Amino acid sequence: METLSKLRAAAAECRACPLWKCGTQTVFGEGKPRSLIVFVGEQPGDREDLAGRPFVGPAGALLDRSLEEANIDRAKVYLTNVVKHFKWEPRGKRRIHKKPNAAEIAACRPWLDAEIRVIRPRAIICLGAVAAQAVIGPKFRVSVQRGQFVESELAEYVTATVHPSSILRSPSDEARRIERARFVADLKKIRKVIAAAA
């Protein structure tokens, strides 16, 4: 029988694509085995790669604050990524995020499918374009369709919003404030829809 702990142990040995060579370790999902909501990001970042846990860097801190504001308990959700290894390129002494390609996403997809199969969530929320296009489909545009629910075999409610890291990259404090408010509004809408259907 599949369990998250068994999947995590198996994923640690994954060599399905070359990313295991540049990542420090596999960063598997984390959270309750029977979570109502699964959040899916693109890939672990530098902090996540070193810690071996998803969403523990600056974007994770912003996500934590936003979930709290939207009245969603992080302890009751499951957080994961489409790609389980950190893809990066050197820039001086820093490791800079590099977007995963289609082959790397496809190689990692069985792990995400297995996580969803074990958890059986009520809702899947994709964070960012890479996650949305991997989970929902290539025609989904976060910039146009954020917060809109789509039909999916994966869960009753499936949608996408921006990735918290995109908010951090906003050009000014005011832009970050506006984008974070929009992100929290998306999370509140999602929580309300799920609560109403419960």
Image (spheres, grey):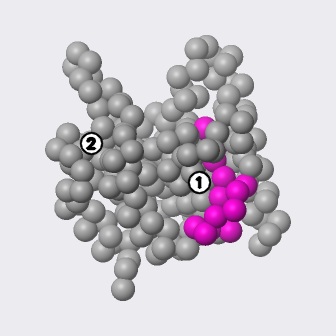
Q: Which mark is residue 50?
A: 2
**Quadrant into which the N terminus falls:** bottom left
Q: Nearer the viewer, residue 152 or 195?
A: 152
- Asked whether residue 183 is in view, the answer is yes
What residue span does the magenta drawing correspond to? 149-162
Q: Is residue 184 left or right of residue 155?
A: right
N-terminal label among 2 and 1: 2
Q: Is residue 189 magenta?
A: no
Q: Residue at x 42, y 70 (%)?
A: 114
Alpha carbon distance from label 2 to label 1? 29 Å
- Dot 1: what SS? loop
- Residue 141: x, y in percent? 64, 39
Residue corresponding to mark 1 = 136
| Magenta highlight: main SS | loop
Q: Which residue reaches farthest front?
A: 139
**Quadrant into which the C terminus falls:** bottom right
- Asked whether residue 36 is in view, the answer is no
- Residue 153: x, y in percent? 61, 69
Q: Residue at x 77, y 65 (%)?
A: 195
Q: Quadrant of residue 36?
A: bottom right
Q: Residue at x 30, y 74 (%)?
A: 6
Q: Which residue reaches farthest left?
A: 21
